[in-house]
Image: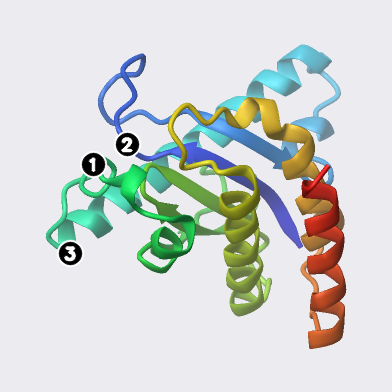
Amino acid sequence: MVHCFLINTVCPVSALEAGDSRVLFSRVFGPDDASQDEALSAEERRALQRDKLLLVARQVLSSVTLSREASGRGPTEGVAAAAATDEATALQEADSGVQRLRAGDPFLGERSVLWLAVQSLAFSLVCLPHENLLLAEGTLRSLARHCLEHLRLLGHGSEVLLKVDRIDFLLSKLLPHGQLLFLNHRFTQSLEKDIAAYMAK
């Protein structure tokens, strides 16, 4: 099962300190570690969950930066030319990786994080340790592709916060309740039609 899905920044943002990341969208599936602590209020649980997701975003930012530096590119290289690059090309040139989160850092149990960095944005899935990572990678790429194609997240002035309902719809189709789906060709075509019809509204 997938624990959560994140979209965060991986390039400098003027309002943030160097090396920090902003979580633009997150969706947690199932109960979180904090929900098991009855001593915490609902507000404290939300704050703890937010802190954990921010820590994951920072670790993804660090991995993306290292990956880009190792390949001879700076953290912001390619972002300046974003307007001239279409979404399909940007996705093909995306950096990707996987990393392990040890138990207690930040979740109670061990987790795997798959990330896909497209120019200034990173899409991430936090999975339980026994999850099929190949299937998770395919799902992550599909989610990123639909977000980029239909929501134009790389466009100038794009505002992820105004498109939450559309991202939620994509998650309900491609990752229902955090469950990874084995999709055959016919079912994939049906999903594509449903998504295209919804996004055209």
Between the C-alphas of marks 2 and 3, the distance is 16 Å
Element at badge 1? loop
Whether the residues at callouts 2 and 1 have beta carbons within 8 Å, the answer is yes
Q: In the image, residue 22 lies at what x, y percent?
A: 47, 28
N-terminal-most mark, 2 or 3: 2
Element at badge 3? loop
Which residue is disc 3 drawn over? 71
Q: Quadrant of residue 94?
A: bottom left
Q: Can residue 102 be seen?
A: yes
Q: Can residue 110 be seen?
A: no
Residue shown at 26% from the left, 45% from the top: 81
Label 3 crowd (10 A; few <14 / some 14-19 / many >=20): few
Which disc is residue 151 wearing? none
Residue shown at 87% from the left, 61% from the top: 194
Q: In the image, residue 70 lies at what x, y percent?
A: 17, 61
Q: Quadrant of residue 95?
A: bottom left
Between the C-alphas of marks 3 and 1, the distance is 13 Å
Q: Amino acid at mark 2?
A: Cys
- Relative side of 190 to 138, left or right: right
Label 2 crowd (10 A; few <14 / some 14-19 / many >=20): many
Which residue is disc 1 drawn over? 76
Element at badge 2? loop
Q: In the image, residue 3 lies at what x, y percent?
A: 71, 51
In the image, residue 1 sits, relative to residue 33, either above or below, namely: below
Quarter occupied by the C terminus: top right
Of residue 3 and residue 90, the one placed in the foreground of this image is 90
Label 1 crowd (10 A; few <14 / some 14-19 / many >=20): some
Between the C-alphas of marks 2 and 1, the distance is 6 Å
- Relative side of 168 to 141, left or right: right
Which residue is disc 2 drawn over? 11
